[in-house]
Amino acid sequence: MRSGVTKKVIGLILAVFAVLFYSAAYVVDEREQTVVTRWGQIKGKPETTPGLKLKVPFLDKVHRFPKNLQNWDGVPGQVPTLDKTFIWVDSFARWRIVDAVQFKISIGSLSGARDRLDDIIDPAVRNAITSNKLIETVRWTNRTLDTMEVGLEDEDKPVIGKVHIGRQEITSQIRDAAAVKLKEFGIELVDVEIKRLNYVQQVREAVYKRMIAERRQIAEKFRSEGQGEARRIRGEMEKELKKIQSEAYRTGETKKGAADAEATRIYAEAYGRDPEFYSFTKTLDSYREALGKDTSVVLSTESGFFSYLKSIGGNLGGE
């Protein structure tokens, strides 16, 4: 009977020790750090190394905070630049908790930290954008833009300005301005970057119209140059064609004159040898051209055109 009671007591004692150990022990993950409080007061230093840790059971409370980098996404908003151009700015940042005790005292939770980041980083971004011209926010070097050179001469290229500070310097200014204010909350601001820049709707439409006008100007320049080149080619072609035609006409006339001269010489030589035969053949040619198969001709007997027919008829009658 006593042995059974003893076993129960021992079991109860072991159970109490198990409950106490379970309440006193906790595990710290490698990605987190912890702060222990007792009755709302922070006890000791934060635990930043991973492993099994102990606390006073039922009295101590463990608060866990991330040790790795955290992301912050800003709310996109409309911001005017120094040269009065309204742009749409979307930024982001990376931060981490470097003093868990200070973070617990001043903020206490990640949701509160994000609200505080909104209150500090957003104004810093707005102040940096409004204090600089648009080109400083968009570019960080004075490298020549290839897209500005297409189809335009040097005097036609739009002047976009020169970068004096640049986007990298502006983001560094934003980070430095916000980091000082976040340090008192146990937060280290690692970096701040501008995720997206864009014109607001009204300015965007005006920019699109200007871009269209510039493209049309370049297209018109190409068209005019093409038309001028086409006219030059057509002029040279017509000039060459007239030259060829002139030379061909001169060659043809030369050969035609030589042929006529040769024909005249042959005719003259033939006529000189037998004038009567030459006259006879020419008359026959005239008859052949003037008289067809079904042609009827009424001629006077005294007609010169009829003389050879008359002489032929007389000769036939005489035979």
Image (cartoon, grey):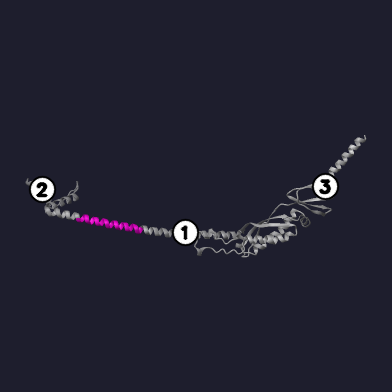
The x and y percentages for residue 13 are: 88, 41
Q: Earlier in the sequence, mark 3 or mark 2?
A: 3
Disc 1 residue crowd, few under 14, some 14–19, many 20+, Cα 10 Å: some
**Real-space Cα separation, disc 3 to disc 2, in angstroms:** 160 Å
Residue 222, which numbered label?
1
Q: Amino acid at mark 1?
A: Phe
Magenta residues?
A: 238-261
Crowding near the residue tagged with mark 3, few <14, some 14–19, many ≥20 C-alpha atoms within 10 Å: some
- Nearer to us of marks 3 and 2 is 3
Residue beneath disc 2: 313
In depth, the one of 261 and 180 nearer the eye is 180
Identity of the residue drawn at 89% across and 38% down: 8
Name the one closer to the observer, 170 or 284: 170
Which of discs 1 and 2 lies nearer the camera? The answer is 1
Residue 259: image location, x then y, percent: 21, 54
Looking at the image, is 295 positioned above or below residue 138? Answer: above
Instruction: First in sequence, mark 1 or 2: give its number.
Output: 1
Q: Main secondary structure of the magenta part?
A: helix
Looking at the rendered structure, the secondary structure element under dot 1 is: helix
> Is residue 218 inside the magenta stretch?
no
Q: Which residue is mark 3?
A: 24
Using a 10 Å C-alpha cutoff, classify the residue at mark 2 as few (fewer than 14 neighbours), some (14 to 19) or many (20 or more).
few
For the point 12% across and 53% down, the residue is 273
Tell whether label 2 touches label 3 (CB within 8 Å). Answer: no
What quarter of the picture does the C terminus occupy? top left
Which residue is nearer to you in this view: 318 or 144?
Answer: 144
Q: Is residue 60 visible?
A: yes
- Spot the residue most to the top: 1
In the picture as drawn, the residue positioned furthest to the right comes out as 2
Task: Please name the amino acid that badge 2 sits on.
Answer: Gly
Per the image, label 2 sits on a secondary structure element best described as helix
> Mark 3 or mark 1: which is in front?
3
